[in-house]
Amino acid sequence: MEQPVRADHTGRVGSRRPRARLGKVLAPYLLSLPAGLWLVALFLIPLVIMLSLSLHTCNFGTGACVMTWHWAEFGQQLSLYHGPFLNSIYYAGAAALIDLVISYPIAYWIAFYGGSKKNFFLLMLLVPFFVSFVIRTVVWNFILSDNGVILGSLKHAHLLPQGFRVLSTGYAVVAGLAYNYLPFTALPLYVAIERIDKTVLDAAYDLYATRREAFTRVILPLTVPGLFAAFLLTFIPALGDYVNQQVLGGTSNTMIGSVIQTAFANLDYAGGSALSAMLLAIALIGIFAYARVLGSRTIEEYL
Amino acid sequence: MTERNGSGPHESAIDPSVWRGMTQSRLSRRQLLTSAGTGAGMLGVSALLAACGVKGASSGGGPTPGGVGTTAWWAKQKSTKHVNFGNWPYYIDVLSGKHLSLEHFTAQTGISVTYTEPIGNNMPFYAKIRTSLSAKQSTGYDIIVMTNNSPALGYLIQFGWLTPLDHGAMPNFDKNAGPLIKNPSWDPGNKYTMAWQSGWTAIGYNSSVIKNPGTSVGVLFDKKYAGKVGMMSDPQELGSLGLLAIGVDPATSTESDWAKAATKLNQQKSDGIVRAYYDQSYIGHLKNGDTVVTQAWSGDIFQADLNSKYSDLKLLIPNEGGMFWTDNMCIPMYAQNPRDAMTLMDYFYQPSVEAVVEYYNDYVCPVPAAKQVLLHPTGWAAQALTKMKPEIGLPTTVTANAPTVFPTPAYVKNSRSYYQYKSQEELTTWNNLFVPITQGA
């Protein structure tokens, strides 16, 4: 795109040319400096500290940590807590899939039939999420209590066995995750569907497509990158979640986020860092897989 | 020990059960900061602290710089007419936002008190103040309150981060301190600490479902109640219960006992008996019927039992023993006003003052003589108790006659102490046995 003659913003050429050229060369770097500094200071440095802490040996009492290249930390943590890792992957994956199934019709309807009220409907979708995450989760605990408003009434009517419960099970955890992360799926999906040129549907009908064919052969393929992005944007935060499991889960539903939180609360910085590093690796594998399959550009468009 | 969900003042006239149900447990003395943390970083939701006592160095503490705490040093400490007291939330008498006991202290001595409630959990608070302490700077507090079974108190003693007390300046303590908290195992001779309040970790059960709970911890392992049993996620509480269940006194247990206790607890879990491992939220689940028997803190059950809606909830201190814990006042090193801190700490050991504090708190009172004040109040205490009564709504005799506030000999006999770790390796071994039980997959 370079214009061969114009050298700087004022358009002056001649004696000031070399300096102007330097400014032009530096401009992109200067412009990206704030973002770059932000990334380095608040992402890269903490990341390096976390990775290096995982190889330290820490005194719980004084908090003093010494670099010991203690690679065994990873193996130890993994042997103790591989179960919660698998739980996390399983629950987060299930919740993300459920959210896709629920969000798709919602997003589709708003995009195609929302008309001038689209923004209003989107707002309605988000309103429940203005309430604190934790409070919403804890309220489920109240609603789904063994003798609470729902299960208590059903048991009273002998529609459920007395021993039946929802809380303290894996199902409750998946349901809680699906509920809490719904907007993370719905919004990227909406963006994906909204941007489809509606005239392609007319074209499909002109070519004698039925409504079903128009959806499966035109709309759905066009939203595949959006589906993947929505899945990933739900799956990754849900992977590290520990609130739902602690509030709704039972004895065998621990997720890795909870283990990490416990480790840091116990001032076991090395163990917590090692677990965090492994969790990060899992998330990165997901993102790289997405980039390989669908290209790295598409995910940015939905963020 | 993490938060003891001691519940706020007694139930008000309007039954707040709906709100309580929705929030799982009342905003309690111990919970306020946790809830705040919940809103901010969600860290408070579980607060699964490994609460384990690490024993101080066998010498009874590290070197104290500059002769701090010696008789000669104390002789030089003059009153500054001010003291900073950092405590747990809702852990002192409150009347319309004021603390009558502290106002009385200021009126008597002319020493003003800045009373704050910064401690939500032992370990995170310890992590905060250790930055100042290791830099040899004041933490900003002259008095802090640490639980005996948390590693934090052991660390503070071990690293010489507590000011040894002036034993010439605690006449009320010498005269009135009760046998349960005088000369305790975690601080022989009360070199560094004076008790603030104590309590038990025992068993809470719903007497409408369990008519005959027996007298043993076995009720927590009874297959009849499979899926309705609550256990604590705190590894110290969980492990100690496991040790009681295999017939071992936690205080004198060995590593091989720990392994057996862990096996017992794992069996309880794999048999499907345990519903979940709870933090302070256990009391909400007991109240709404999700659990029928659970590990419980004595103060919670006492408070719940006073409310007619939860009068079915009962406390059982089993034959094997109830775990007895104590929160301790201590003076961190480099405190600015140690002389006034001593004066305030000793002030609380007057029966009349402790009676006022306990009427609100309902934990185990460190001053047995306060019982007589609650039964027959006179002077300042009578005025203060009368003022507080409308808000608390119960006669002072209820507090005076509660065995969980003024323990009977049977309660004292059944009290057990937590294991005191001798090294970090022991603490790690303990945690690696009991934390994975609560973090299972």
Image (cartoon, coloured by chain):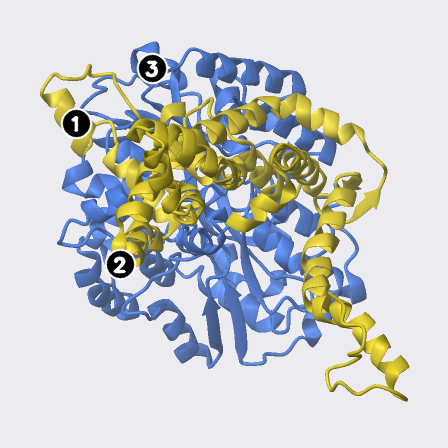
Q: Chain of mark 2?
A: A
The amino acid on which the numbered mark 1 sits, given as a three-letter code, is Gly
Q: Is residue B390 above or below residue A54?
A: below
Residue A9 seen anywhere in this rendered image of the structure: yes
- Chain B, colour shown: blue
The amino acid on which the numbered mark 3 sits, given as a three-letter code, is Ala
Q: Secondary structure at mark 1?
A: helix
- Residue assigned mark 3: B226
- Chain A, colour shown: yellow
On the rendered structure, is B237 left or right of B290? right
Q: Is residue A40 above or below residue B383?
A: above
* The quadrant where residue A215 appears: top left
Q: Secondary structure at mark 3?
A: loop
N-terminal of the pair, mark 2 or mark 1, is 2
Q: Position of residue B423 (x, y in %)?
A: 73, 35
Total count of labels:
3
